Amino acid sequence: MAISVQELSDRAEIQDLLFHYADIIDRCAAEELRPLFTEDAQIDYSAFGGSVGDVDTTIAFLKEAMPAFSNTQHLNGNIQIKVQGDSAEGRVMCFNPMEMQIDDKPHVFMLGLWYVDSYRRVDGDWRIASRREIKSWVFNTPEFMAL
């Protein structure tokens, strides 16, 4: 099956959007997320005990939760995108090691997850219209067994 130049371009733009999202999260710059989402976006982080709601709900949750981590990396891979005109569906694997200071010592735990997304082109730019996390696995040091 041949892929058009437009579809290749759309996929590349969506991948850039996903990498930009990960960078913003890792820099704890939640307010910078707003233009990455559609105005009516719905985000579901409940797989790991997070918020479910619109962009404002998500940004408020991230502003409260992310400072607890001294370091994070959201590494995206196996990006699967299906484009249909000005909308698209995606499934993105994420490997997320996170560091937290406990008793002045660094403790690292790791999350494996999938993002299941829908995207929509708005004013010529791709945006995330919905994002849902699906838990794949968690590696916890004994201090994090409650996750």
Image: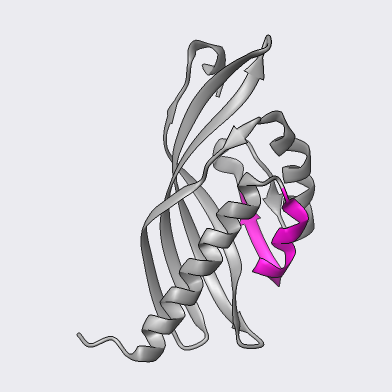
Q: As rendered, which of 57 and 8 lies closer to the eye? A: 8
- Measured as percent of width and height from the top left, residue 85 is found at 47, 88
- Position of the C terminus, as image quadrant, is top right
> Which quarter of the picture shows residue 104?
top right
Residue 41 included in the magenta stretch of the image:
yes
Q: Residue furthest left?
A: 1
Q: In the rendering, at what x and y percent does residue 13 appear?
A: 49, 76
Q: Is residue 40 above or below residue 8?
A: above
Q: Is residue 6 shown left or right of residue 19?
A: left
Q: How many marks?
A: 0
Task: Tell me which residue sits at (45%, 71%) in the image.
Answer: 89
Left/right placement of residue 127 relative to residue 32 reads left
Identify the colour scheme used: one colour
Q: Residue at x 78, y 38 (%)?
A: 64
Q: Nearer the viewer, residue 93 or 25?
A: 25
Residue at image position (52%, 60%) is 19
> Which residue is at a point 41% across and 60% down the rendered structure image?
91
Q: Which residues are magenta?
A: 29-44
Q: Position of residue 28 (x, y in %)?
A: 70, 45
On the picture, is 118 further left or further right than 7? right
* Quarter containing the N terminus: bottom left
Residue 35 covered by magenta stretch: yes
Position of 72 relative to 76 (above/below): above
